[in-house]
Image: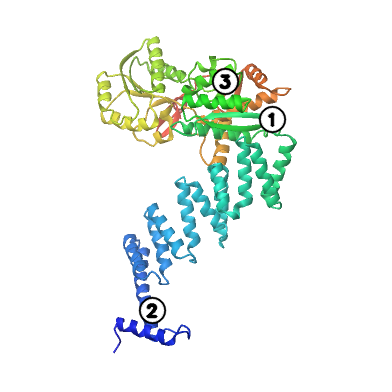
């Protein structure tokens, strides 16, 4: 008769006590049979779950694999079950559950052959979620992989993370946690410190790299940087006054990347002339003034690029002009900015030009005379409808209705119905992209027949995906997402190669602003100071940049062109008229 389980435990305790210090005995035969039975049961459960997985019955497979781990966590199929659970959740697009099972696999089965694959899944998911430091840490572990393909992917994925995605503090954190990357990380940290105007810290980091890793590729590059830096230090401090936090931060970062691209492509005599000092305005004019004071008085910069918003730029421009410091505003649109003083320059054509252009287009192209307005009640929307109205009335047209709405509005029904009752020929909506995606379907639902006119927001990529925007007319800059021939297409390719994303108009204006300063310095036959730079820019007249022929006083050489949406694509109105189809 087979002994009961409590009795079996008692027997084992007695055997252990009797043997004392004679060493651990071999397990009795019936315990081996017990383990064998458990393994057979675990294998049976696993095979059933595996068949479900192979048949595409993922929910059934998940239940089976989870049962294997719950009842038989120490079975030889344990890591297989955890790995397949990870794959099931990936196929179901449950990223949170994928991370749950990668973590379980790495923690409970550290010697599993699936370990590297779990790390790869985590690295990719964290990268997509914008958790770049966590992603980089996983890729660093994969550098030790025995799989050449995984190691190669980790190396290629780490380059853009180190060069563009990680902040200086994150690079230092990664340095502390990933010894295998020390040479390359030290190089990135040193270059980042130099780019942020921290010259002494950067030089010291590069010296440490040369001392600790003299024969590495990173060490050789650091030695070259040190030699150039010690022979001829950067001569000019350039301030970037941009919102890198807050609602306007996408514009700030876009300008910053445009400047970096311009610097990376500089000629040999100008490429290393600049120490870049970036200050965050947060989109707040008071903060912008405080940071401008630091750049002008403490850092003694040669010039400032920024800010990006008119509200910030006007007070900062006045301060810069008072202290005789060149300020180039790449994106601010208030047409009065360039009149503040001789040290203030403006690149972006005024939004007033777009408002006037759309009014003339509707009247001269279609013969319309009756209009309605629907606009956000912010500075942009108010300014656009103001100049649109002025131009309509100047040309003999009439505004039948005007409706405005505050930020965050989602229901436009009553406003649209009031406009519809006036029966306008055209409806001018200078809205922002997220607002357009709410307004356009409601216009269709309420069967508004008026031709839709808009601002540049209607040319946004996210707007084009909507089925309700077909036939709208708007001004558009090709660099906002579309490749064109000439200089515009060149930056489009280079920007995408460097940053892994498409350039915006703000990126292009940041690029042009930096190139204009480089050009002014090259033109001068002597050491450049603030006054000489101002004189060079003042006599430059116009500059042929990637955004077109620019006047440094904010007056563009042309108004641009009107575009429409045809079958989900942006297309110039002129191209439609010229096409035989």
| Residue closest to the eye, 575 or 510 | 510
- The colour scheme is rainbow
- For label 1, the residue is 235
The picture places residue 170, in percent across and down from the top left corner, at 53, 45
Mark 2 touching mark 1, by CB under 8 A? no
Residue 320: give its label: 3
Disc 1 secondary structure class? loop
Mark 3 crowd level (few <14, some 14–19, many ≥20, 10 Å Cα): many
Is residue 147 shown left or right of residue 524?
Answer: left
Q: Earlier in the sequence, mark 1 or mark 3?
A: 1
Residue 555 visible in image: no
Q: Earlier in the sequence, mark 3 or mark 2?
A: 2
The picture places residue 210, in percent across and down from the top left corner, at 70, 48
Disc 2 secondary structure class? helix
- For label 2, the residue is 35
Give the quadrant of residue 323. top right
């Amino acid at each position: 008769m087979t002994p009961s389980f409590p009795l079996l435990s008692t027997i084992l305790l007695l055997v252990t006590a009797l043997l004392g210090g004679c060493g651990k005995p071999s397990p009795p035969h019936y315990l081996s049979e017990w383990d064998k039975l458990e393994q057979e049961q675990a294998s049976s459960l696993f095979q059933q779950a595996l068949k479900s997985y192979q048949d595409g019955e993922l929910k059934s497979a998940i239940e089976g694999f989870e049962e294997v781990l719950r009842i038989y966590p120490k079975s030889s199929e344990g890591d297989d079950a955890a790995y397949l659970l990870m794959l099931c959740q990936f196929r179901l697009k449950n990223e949170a559950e994928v991370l749950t099972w990668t973590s379980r696999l790495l923690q409970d089965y550290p010697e599993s052959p699936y370990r590297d694959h779990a790390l790869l899944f985590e690295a990719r998911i964290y990268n997509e979620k914008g958790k770049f430091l966590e992603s980089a840490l996983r890729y660093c572990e994969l550098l030790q992989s025995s799989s050449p393909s995984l190691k190669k992917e980790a190396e290629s994925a780490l380059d853009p993370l180190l060069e563009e995605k990680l902040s200086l503090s994150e690079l230092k954190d990664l340095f502390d946690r990933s010894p295998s990357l020390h040479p390359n990380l030290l190089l990135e940290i040193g270059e980042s410190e130099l780019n942020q105007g921290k010259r002494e810290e950067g030089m010291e980091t590069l010296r440490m790299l040369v001392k600790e890793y003299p024969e590495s590729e990173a060490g050789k590059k650091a030695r070259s940087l040190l030699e150039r830096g010690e022979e001829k230090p950067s001569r000019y401090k350039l301030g970037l006054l941009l919102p890198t936090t807050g609602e306007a931060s996408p514009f700030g970062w876009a300008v910053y990347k445009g400047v970096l691209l311009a610097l990376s492509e500089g000629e040999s005599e100008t490429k290393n002339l600049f120490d870049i000092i970036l200050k965050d305005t947060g989109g707040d004019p008071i903060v912008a003034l405080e940071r401008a004071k630091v750049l002008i008085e403490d850092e003694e910069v040669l010039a400032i690029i920024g800010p990006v918003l008119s509200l910030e730029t006007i007070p900062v421009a006045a301060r810069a002009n008072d202290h005789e410091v060149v300020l180039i505003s790449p994106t601010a649109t208030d047409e009065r900015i360039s009149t503040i003083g001789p040290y203030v320059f403006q690149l972006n054509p005024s939004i007033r030009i777009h408002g006037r252009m759309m009014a003339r287009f509707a009247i001269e192209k279609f013969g319309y005379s009756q209009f309605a307005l629907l606009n956000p009640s912010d500075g942009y929307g108010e300014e656009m409808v103001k100049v649109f109205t002025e131009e309509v009335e100047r040309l003999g047209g009439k505004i039948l209705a005007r409706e405005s709405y505050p930020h965050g509005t989602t229901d436009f029904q009553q406003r649209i119905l009031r406009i519809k009752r006036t029966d306008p020929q055209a409806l001018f909506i200078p809205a922002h992209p997220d607002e357009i995606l709410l307004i356009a379907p409601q216009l269709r639902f309420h069967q508004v027949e008026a031709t839709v006119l808009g601002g540049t927001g209607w040319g946004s990529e996210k707007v084009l995906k909507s089925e309700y925007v077909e036939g709208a007319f708007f001004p558009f800059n090709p660099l906002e997402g579309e490749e064109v021939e000439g200089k515009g297409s060149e930056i489009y390719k280079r920007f995408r190669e460097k940053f892994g994303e498409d350039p915006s108009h703000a990126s292009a204006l940041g690029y042009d602003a930096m190139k204009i300063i480089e050009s002014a310095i090259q033109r001068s036959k002597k050491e450049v100071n603030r006054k000489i730079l101002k004189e060079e820019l003042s006599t430059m007249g116009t500059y042929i940049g990637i955004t077109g022929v620019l006047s440094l006083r904010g007056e563009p050489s042309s108004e641009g062109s009107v575009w429409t949406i045809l079958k989900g694509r942006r297309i110039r109105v002129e191209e439609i008229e010229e096409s035989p189809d």
